Image (tube, rainbow, N blue to C red):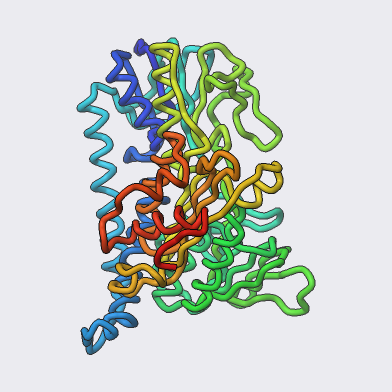
């Protein structure tokens, strides 16, 4: 069976399905192939969406147990029903998965569930439950995403040592959980199980948490998470994990005794998913870390084959992949496509959230860029006081000479939502003065952004 398309997208995650829909809107005949039973990719199935569902459920538990009483709300007894919590998480995933499938159909994209392999430039073979199909396309877009990485010599067995996938579905609450890696995934899922009752210890090779985040903001986040009960052992090089009598023993360099626990969450990052795609056979170039090499137009070294998202590296974020998918197909249609990587936001969904866009203080210093910083604590924000969420601060970095905003970093309540204003401001080249002069409603959390912008020139009103 032979089918002809203008574009075949391999991968039905955020980059793949969004790119496919936009391509169809532009008039291309498009097929989107995914190996899983539902579309949406890692983000929807075992990543962004289910983790946020679990974070929300566990945070509500924490509020019922710890914070309701400060509002004068008495809850006699609070219990965890993990089975129901997991079922809710699964319903959210299934509902959104069906939604993605419906969106593809609505926009005229042929969604194909099967395993894809590029057999030659312009030809993709798909193995489905019903047999094999050969899809012909002028353009093939690889959007297969990434998979969990591990450390040398440590096997993710899915029972004792798990990735984020397993940590989203533990069938019981581990008494002791060791998280290897203090990045976004480790801190988010560590927070979930900490709230549900686990004793959580985070082992991190570096001397700080949240690598890549502004150091001042990361340190503020660490102090907040410490108060919540997470334990951190920084500067810890994990050398191995042994299972002894049903117990995990995590070996750390320089320690005489291992760290013992019931479960280990491996959260040291992700690696590109390229296996089985036929890339070697058709000659697609990979770099030394396994990422697909592309030019500024997302084109590989093989004509007609493109790649986007996690599989090409950079910020491994769902929304970055979405923007790349749209930029690529618009480029294929009009010759013009755009993405500003300096304004791609990043959010860690702990409580409070950590959100950032643009350059950090450390990056600006390393590049020799003259800058000034403004800060404002949520402790001084009226709305934060009223809702009882006063931990954290807003930090704005602006060019010392031009005042153009170079970076915005927030740890605090609803930081991810607050960051959108900063992303818009930076996208339009705003200065800290521009942001400071915008009228912000009172009382709102967004006033902390205004005050931080005022503080860039040391004229904050409420600090």
Q: Which residue is at a point 44% across and 39% down the rendered structure image?
A: 430
Would you place residue 380 above or below residue 409 in this image?
below
Residue 302 in percent (x, y) is at 59, 14
Would you place residue 314 above or below residue 327 in this image?
below
Which quarter of the rendered picture does the C terminus lie within?
Answer: bottom left
- Residue 33 found in image quarter: top left
Which quarter of the rendered picture does the N terminus lie within?
Answer: top left
Observer-nearest residue: 367 or 15? 367
Residue 391 visible from this viewpoint: yes
Would you place residue 397 above or below residue 187 in this image?
above
Would you place residue 463 above or below residue 277 in this image?
below
Q: Residue furthest bottom?
A: 76
Q: Which residue is at a point 33% across and 75% down the rendered structure image?
A: 388
Q: Which residue is at a point 51% across and 13% down the rendered structure image?
A: 304
- Residue 379 found in image quarter: bottom left
Observer-nearest residue: 280 or 231? 231
Residue 197 in percent (x, y) is at 42, 78
Residue 367 in percent (x, y) is at 69, 42
For residue 394, side relative to residue 100 (left or right): right
Observer-nearest residue: 335 or 377? 377
Observer-nearest residue: 328 or 287? 328
Q: Which residue is at a point 27% across and 37% down the rendered structure image?
A: 100
Residue 255 in percent (x, y) is at 76, 75
Residue 45 visible from this viewpoint: no
For residue 71, side relative to residue 394 (left or right): left
For residue 264, side relative to residue 94 (left or right): right
* Image label count: 0
């Amino acid at each position: 069976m032979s089918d002809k398309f203008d574009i075949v997208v391999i991968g039905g995650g955020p980059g793949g399905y969004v790119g496919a829909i936009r391509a169809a809107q532009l008039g291309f005949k498009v097929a989107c192939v995914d190996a899983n039973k539902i579309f949406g990719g890692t983000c929807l199935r075992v990543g962004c969406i289910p983790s946020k569902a679990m974070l929300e459920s566990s945070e509500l538990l924490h509020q019922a147990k710890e914070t309701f009483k400060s509002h004068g709300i008495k809850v006699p007894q609070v219990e965890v029903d993990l089975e129901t919590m997991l079922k809710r998480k699964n319903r959210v995933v299934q509902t959104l998965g069906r939604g993605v499938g419906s969106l593809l159909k609505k926009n005229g994209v042929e969604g194909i569930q099967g395993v894809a392999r590029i057999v030659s430039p312009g030809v993709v073979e798909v193995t489905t439950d019903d047999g094999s199909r050969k899809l012909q396309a002028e353009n093939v877009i690889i959007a297969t995403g990434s998979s969990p990485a591990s450390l040398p010599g440590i096997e993710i067995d899915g029972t004792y040592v798990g990735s984020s996938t397993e940590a989203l579905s533990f069938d019981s609450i581990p008494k002791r959980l060791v998280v290897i890696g203090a990045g976004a995934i480790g801190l988010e899922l560590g927070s979930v199980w900490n709230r549900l009752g686990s004793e959580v210890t985070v082992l991190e090779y570096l001397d700080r948490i949240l690598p890549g985040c502004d150091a001042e903001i990361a340190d503020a986040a660490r102090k907040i998470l410490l108060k919540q009960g997470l334990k951190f052992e920084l500067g810890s090089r994990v050398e191995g994990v042994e299972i002894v009598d049903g117990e995990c023993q995590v070996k750390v360099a320089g320690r005489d005794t291992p760290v013992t626990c019931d479960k280990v969450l491996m959260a040291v990052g992700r690696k590109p998913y390229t296996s089985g795609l036929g890339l070697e056979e058709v000659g697609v170039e990979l770099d030394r870390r396994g990422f697909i090499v592309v030019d500024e137009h997302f084109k590989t070294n093989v004509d007609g084959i493109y790649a986007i998202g996690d599989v090409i590296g950079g910020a491994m974020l769902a929304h970055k992949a979405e923007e790349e998918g749209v930029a690529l197909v618009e480029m294929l249609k009009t010759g013009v496509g755009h993405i500003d990587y300096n304004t791609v936001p990043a959010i860690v969904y702990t409580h409070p959230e950590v959100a950032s866009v643009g350059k950090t203080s450390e990056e600006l210093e390393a590049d020799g860029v003259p800058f000034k910083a403004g800060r404002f604590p949520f402790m001084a924000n009226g709305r934060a006081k009223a809702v009882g969420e006063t931990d954290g601060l807003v930090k704005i970095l602006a060019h010392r000479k031009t005042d153009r905003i170079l970076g915005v970093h927030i740890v605090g309540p609803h930081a991810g939502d607050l960051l959108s204003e900063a992303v818009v401001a930076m996208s339009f080249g705003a200065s800290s003065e521009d942001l400071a002069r915008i009228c912000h409603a009172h009382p709102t959390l967004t006033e902390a952004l205004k005050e931080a912008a005022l503080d860039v020139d040391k004229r904050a009103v409420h600090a």
